[in-house]
Amino acid sequence: MRIPILKLYDCLLVSIQWELDDQTALQFQEDLLHKIHETSANGVVIDITSIDFIDSFIAKVLGDVINMSKLMGAKVVITGIQPAVAITLIELGISLEDVLTALDLEKGLEKLKQELGE
């Protein structure tokens, strides 16, 4: 099952609505990078509110997606990080130092607009 990636002006919105398996996570990574390239998006908001837990592979893929997006020139905001997910990311040593975060999608969009100077 593919994760929908919506374009809003010069940004992409992603709302992950179910727990990710390895194949879906890899497909998402590929789809998002292609969509950034195809649309020349300046920013990406990834909402993970529906994800209650992640394993080490999914955490690594998420970190990779963020870094790859930045390499392609898109700023990334992650929204809706659940407490268990935050704990897992830190315990696994997944560094999200330069990643913008927000509590919800609305605040994430506002933060992205600020970062993009809009």
Image (spheres, rainbow, N blue to C red):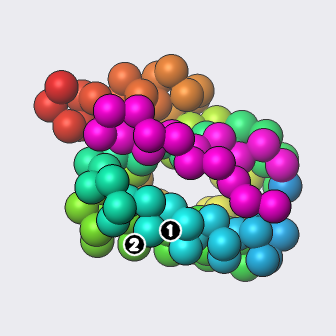
Which percent across, then down, holds residue 108? Answer: 46, 31
The residue that mark 2 highlights is 68
Q: Residues within 10 Å of mark 2 (few under 14, many from 20)?
A: some
Q: Name the side, left or right, on which 61 lies relative to 68.
A: right
Asked if residue 12 lies in the magenta stretch, the reply is yes
Q: Name the side, left or right, on which 111 lies relative to 63.
A: left
Q: CA distance from mark 2 to mark 1?
A: 5 Å
* Span of residues in magenta: 1-18
What amino acid type should be assigned to the residue bearing mark 1? Answer: Val
Which element type, helix, strand or loop, lies under badge 1? helix
Do the residues under discs 2 and 1 have CB atoms within 8 angstroms? yes
What amino acid type should be assigned to the residue bearing mark 2? Answer: Met
Residue plotted at (83% across, 69% down): 21
Specify the quadrant that holds the C terminus. top left
Asked if residue 85 lies in the magenta stretch, the reply is no
Q: Residues within 10 Å of mark 1 (few under 14, many from 20)?
A: many
